[in-house]
Image: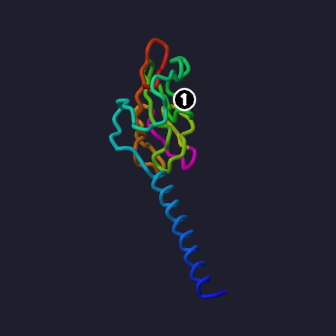
Amino acid sequence: MSAAQERRTLLERRTVVLAVGAAGAAAALTACGGSDGSGGAESVEQPGSGGAGGAVLAKTADIPEGGGVVFAAQKVVVTQPSAGEFKAFSATCTHQGCAVKDVVDNVITCPCHNSTFDAATGSPTGGPATQPLPTRKISVAGDSITLA
């Protein structure tokens, strides 16, 4: 192989290594992205949160008291911490971006690393997650829960 060919091969390898490294860094930053840390109990819409405004998610009877339902397509989890009180949060765990799985006994659980969150506030209650789940805006009219 000539010196020019060796140099071209070396440059091509460097380009590939740099591109792969940049893609990995971008993926890591995206997965580690969290909320603004407000952790408030009010439901506010997060920009670019994935759900279409005005979409009816469920009937109030579909959300169990002390539990909740994860709506994967909308990337939202709706909870009912106490009778008639409905909350909504991002269904994306703030630890590494996995989708939360379920809500049982007022605890939202992420299956990836077992982070847990309070179903009333979205605040972390265990596991490696340290940031709360961002709140999402919903409205309850009659027996319908709508994503705002």
Q: Mark 1 highlights which residue? A: 69
Say above or below: 129 vs 71: below
Seen at 38% across and 30% down, the residue is 43
- Looking at this view, is 39 or 4 the one in front? 4
Seen at 35% across and 30% down, the residue is 42
Q: Is residue 113 magenta?
A: yes
Residue 14 x %, y %: 54, 74
Seen at 44% across and 24% down, the residue is 86
Say above or below: 145 vs 7: above
- Dividing the picture into quadrants, the one containing residue 125 is top left
Say above or below: 111 vs 24: above
Seen at 49% across and 32% down, the residue is 51
Residue 28 x %, y %: 49, 56
Q: Amino acid at mark 1?
A: Val
- Please give left or right for residue 36 compared with residue 113 in the image: left
Q: Is residue 131 magenta?
A: no
Residue 100 x %, y %: 54, 40
Magenta-tinted stretch: 111-119
Q: Secondary structure at mark 1?
A: strand
Residue 63 x %, y %: 53, 23
Q: Quadrant of the N terminus?
A: bottom right
Q: Residue furthest top?
A: 142
- Please give left or right for residue 83 compared with residue 58 in the image: left
Number of numbered discs = 1
